[in-house]
Amino acid sequence: MWLYILKRLIQGVFTVWFIATATFFAMHNVPGDPLLNDRAMTAAIRANVEAKYGLDKPLTTQYVIYLSNLVRGDFGISFTQENREVNDIIREHFPVSAILGILAVMFAAAGGVLWGALTALYRNRMPDYIIMFLVILGISVPSFVVAALSQLALVNFNSFAGRTVLPVAGWGTIYHMIVPAMVLGLGTMAYLTRLMRSSMLEIISSDFVRTAKAKGLPPARIFTKHQLRNAILPVVTVLGPAIAAITTGGFVVELVFAIPGLGRYFVQAVQQLDYTVIMGTTVFYGAFLVFMVIVVDVIYGLIDPRVRLK
Amino acid sequence: MAQWGTEQISGDQAFTSSAGKQLGLYALYTLVALSVLLYLLSVAAGNTAGGLGSGAINVERNSITITLREEPPQLDASRATDASSFVVLAHVMEGLIAYDVDNELVPGMAERWEIRADGATFWIREEAKWSDGQAVTAHDFEFAWKRVVDPETASEYSFILYPIKNAEAVNQGELPKEMLGVTALDARTLEVEFERPTPYFDKLVAFNTYFPIREEFYNETDGRYGSDADMMLYNGPYVLGEWVHGASMLWRKNPYYWNENKGFLDEIVIAYITQDVNARLNLFKDGQIVDTHLVAPMLPEAMERRWHIDRFMDGTVFFLEFNHRDGRLTRNYHLRKAMQLAQDPAELVYKVLKEAAYLPAVSLFPIWIDGVDAKFRKEYPPTEHHLDLEKAREHLELARQELGLDEFPPIIFLTGDTPVSLLAAEYYQELYKQNLGLDIRIDVQIFKQRLAKMTSGEFDIVLAGWGPDYDDALTFGDLFASWNLNNRGRYASEEMDAQVRIAQSELDPRLRMDAFGEIQRISYDDVIVIPMYERGWSFVVDPRLKGFRRRAIGPEVDYNYAYLDVSGN
């Protein structure tokens, strides 16, 4: 198993290198550069700034310099957030995104499994219809709509209550987190509910469940050991990428709720063509995603004894 | 058989209810586990960047809470270029000259000054202090200004110091920075030599790039000046108490600030940094921030709530800028004239954009620009513009003949990706199709890409705007000088250049203002641009906050003169 993990990690390093290289050249091929601004610069001023950031060197030289810095774990200094190292930006803002992301994933996973099991149990009856209707809604309504509507609901709720029960935006306490995390996790929760439901339905009509019932095992035991535990496997599979996607994809929610997460920097960097921040966040997110996939594969082996890690 | 069937169903129901109970139990466990997790995460979040929200107004602490649109990249005034940095700097720093509550120039760090044809002298007030209690001296200005033009500083706004002797040459690395025409005669006298007569120099020194820096403190910061709250010295009404990057800021009253008529609050909290105008409105409704601006769709609700809505022109003029480079269709005068005559900005503003605070633009110079004795617009009324389709089509026919075309190829219309610019672009596309039969191809680009295309000239028409840097007609007037790099359409005419030269250096105010009148006439007659609208904002302020200002010059929001009045009037 250790050999397997090592092999996957080496593959992962190559994946990250590929991401870094592709991003680097794609980014430099976009028209414009980070130095362009509303006020045009004279050639002399521009040359001063270019020299400062090493943009006057040929692209291949810049690439070599960039890779050697990357190996040493140095992402460089931001173009727009001058005097700030990209490492600092990631260190300060990724924890915020991560906390929000973890919470959202927990909401999504717990909700998805519970609702999914419930709908499968009450298949083609009222609870099933109601929940599946909400699930379709959750999948099809984009998060910026949900975020804006829930914020509006918070305002109305607070003015109805006559005081600020839950803050409308911002970050720092438990109360700031609940609503954004739920909004962020909503789409994934809906998706997981559907996944759980179909996988549960498949299990319910399988032979070993019928055998267990025939043996007269207590229903609660059949439900837990034979049905839930088997049905949850596909959910675990998608959970890894889901964690990465949620943690890295919180931009809209972070914007609406004024949360100082990394997502904002990621998107702004692309708009501002802030080369170093684009590279830093992309490589970081890429590595994070690769890592989460490896972790899930390992966990999969632990949950399902039929899977052998080689 | 039938009986066996019912038995199975009832058996299934027993299973379902039993499993359902089990599921309910699991749900309960999950809820408990999630609560514990939530608690643990909130402890963890206490160690990450956090907000400071505590209500819009706190009377006991004499503090207010506000928002910023963006995180300032850094707060080194010599290199700042963006609106958010200008807002912060206007509260924590002060130049030689400042603006009062009514937008008039008043003494700042300098108690008096004298501007001559060849230079200027500033006498710095004795009470001027840095936030550590030391005196602000003429040396601090000399050091800061020499640093701005130093090529190594790579300041993008260094051009604004070019009226000072040798500034341009130093900035281009042709002369050492010691040659810059500024000297501290003693601790309280600053002597400036001019490159050319600069009658508007008093308005320039109020700008951020002219703010002072103390040399000895700067050297201690080891190249990180302006990157954090403790990496700066302040000489304005407030100091930066805390700066949590990307999240919050705290401005405190500066105990060493000299002017008692500025800086009345003890604390200004920036608890939220967000561009989302809906989020800001929600925060305002929830009583978390003292002011916010409103966009058109929000106005009905604001009126319903009986808010006091203020309007304000932010000084920016938006226009269709033609590409005057050789080989471009729009280089043809008759084509431009045809397009000018076939449109009416009033229709765009009142029927399409419907932003209550926007004004149809009639000139390159916005409405608030001062003339000699009255407003510029009153002294030099712009050419009256009327939609005239017949004449427009005549010009179009002339253009067709001059260009030797049977059919006009599509005209490339470059625009940004904001909702307003997209709306305007589509309006013009439809308008010119109907009125002139011209085919407009819209090219939507995000900010940097649009600038790249503007700079390289890959457009026929670009939807552009220009905001003022200083309170003088020249901030708009020199825009279409052939040497101005912000003249992205590369308009070039000797007549224009001659007038700009007069406007730059003429000492007689009337003759100088005549030149601006000429510039305004040329820009209409030769159709350099088609003015669209002057941008304005509708905004609301908490009624307990008085003295709040929005400005066209300097910071877009100004709390320097703001104070609390809870008497309910």
Image (spheres, coloured by chain):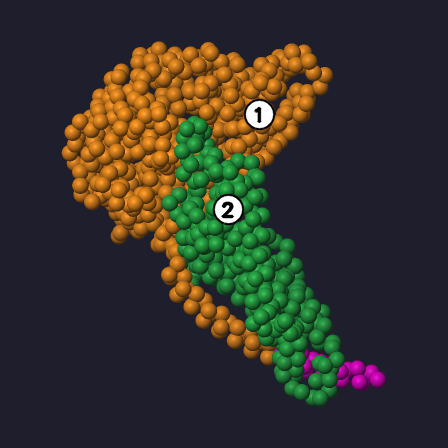
Farthest right residue?
Answer: B1
User: Residue A304: x, y in percent?
Assistant: 63, 75
Identify the chain of the residue marked 2, using the numbered disc in the image: A
> Label 2: which residue?
A64
> Label 1: which residue?
B461
User: Residue A93: x, y in percent?
Assistant: 43, 55
Identify whether B249 is placed above or below A52.
below
For label 2, the crowd category at 10 Å Cα-Cα, with few meaning under 14, some 14 to 19 and many 20 or more, is few
**Disc 1 marks which amino acid?**
Ile
Q: Quadrant of residue A1 in the image?
A: bottom right
Identify whether B94 is placed above or below B498.
below
Identify the chain of the residue marked 1, using the numbered disc in the image: B
Q: Residue at x 18, y 43 (%)?
A: B133
Which circle marks residue A119 in the picture? none
**Disc 2 marks which amino acid?**
Val
Q: Residue at x 48, y 54 (%)?
A: A71
Q: Quadrant of residue A176 in the image?
A: bottom left
- Identify the chain drawn in orange: B
Residue B253 appears anywhere in the view: yes
- Residue range corresponding to the magenta coloring: B1-20
Q: Closer to the camera, B342 or B48?
A: B48
